[in-house]
Amino acid sequence: MEFDFSKYPICDTDIWVNICLADLHSRLFAKYEKLVFADVVEGEIMAWNKNPDFSFIAENFDSYKKHGEIFVIQHDVHIYEEDRKILETTLYQLGFQIDFKNQPPEKNKGEFVSAIYADHFGIPLMQSNDGAFQEGGRGRVEFPDLRIKNWFLLPGSSNGRS
């Protein structure tokens, strides 16, 4: 695969939703140029299409993806077959019951799949404000080398923090 994962962060669903709600996606792309998402997270984001008041969350994602600014890691496409079993075993060891699909949805699956992909592809940074990946959370324990950036607004925004 010809994509340098070390240059871009992987993001979870909550971060994308918060960025869209705050209308800050253009600032995020100005900072990082491209974002990486797990296929499970893409599914969670695209589910926002079902809500007419918030369908713009999925529409923004789809638009950035079509323009090449979002790269989605597809488990069945971007992971070599011999590596899939190893990643699936990791997911099961974390307590998830279903493979890399998220039907029916499992709590925190998008964040943990993102962390597994980050570890597999050498992605150094995950954008997440999920409690499982904050200090003392299970994600921090399981993936201690993964840098987590937790913010609600981008730096320079009112009340922003990074």
Image (cartoon, rainbow, N blue to C red):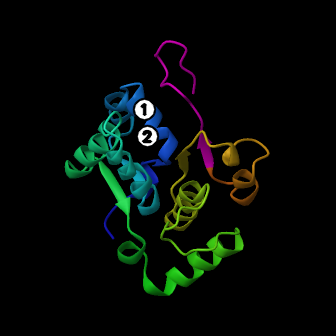
Q: Is residue 46 magenta?
A: no
130 in relation to 4, above or below: above
Q: CA distance from mark 2 to mark 1?
A: 5 Å
Numbered range of the magenta stretch: 147-162
Q: Residue at 36% across / 28% down in the picture?
A: 27
Residue at the right extreme? Answer: 136
Secondary element under disc 1, as helix, strand or loop, is helix
Q: Residue at 57% across / 74% down in the picture?
A: 98
Report crowding for label 1: few under 14, some 14 to 19, many 20 or more residues within 10 A (C-alpha). Answer: some
Q: Amino acid at mark 1?
A: Ile
Q: Amino acid at mark 2?
A: Trp
Residue 103 location in percent, x, y? Answer: 49, 68
Toward the viewer: 86 or 132? Answer: 132
19 in relation to 64, above or below: above
Q: Residue at 20% across / 47% down in the picture?
A: 67
Report crowding for label 2: few under 14, some 14 to 19, many 20 or more residues within 10 A (C-alpha). Answer: many
Toward the viewer: 117 or 22? Answer: 22
Residue at the bottom extreme? Answer: 82
Q: Are circles 2 and 1 on residues that touch, CB within 8 Å?
A: yes
**Res. 144 visible in picture:** no
Residue 33 location in percent, x, y? Answer: 32, 40
Secondary element under disc 2, as helix, strand or loop, is helix
Quadrant of residue 143 in the image? bottom right
Residue 108 location in percent, x, y? Answer: 61, 55
What residue is pinned by disc 1? 19
Side of 156 relative to 65 (left or right): right
Please tell me the numbered disc located at residue 16: 2
Q: Residue at 62% across / 46% down in the picture?
A: 147
Q: Is residue 157 magenta?
A: yes
Instruction: Please state the total of marks drawn on the protein image.
Output: 2
Residue 63 location in percent, x, y? Answer: 22, 45
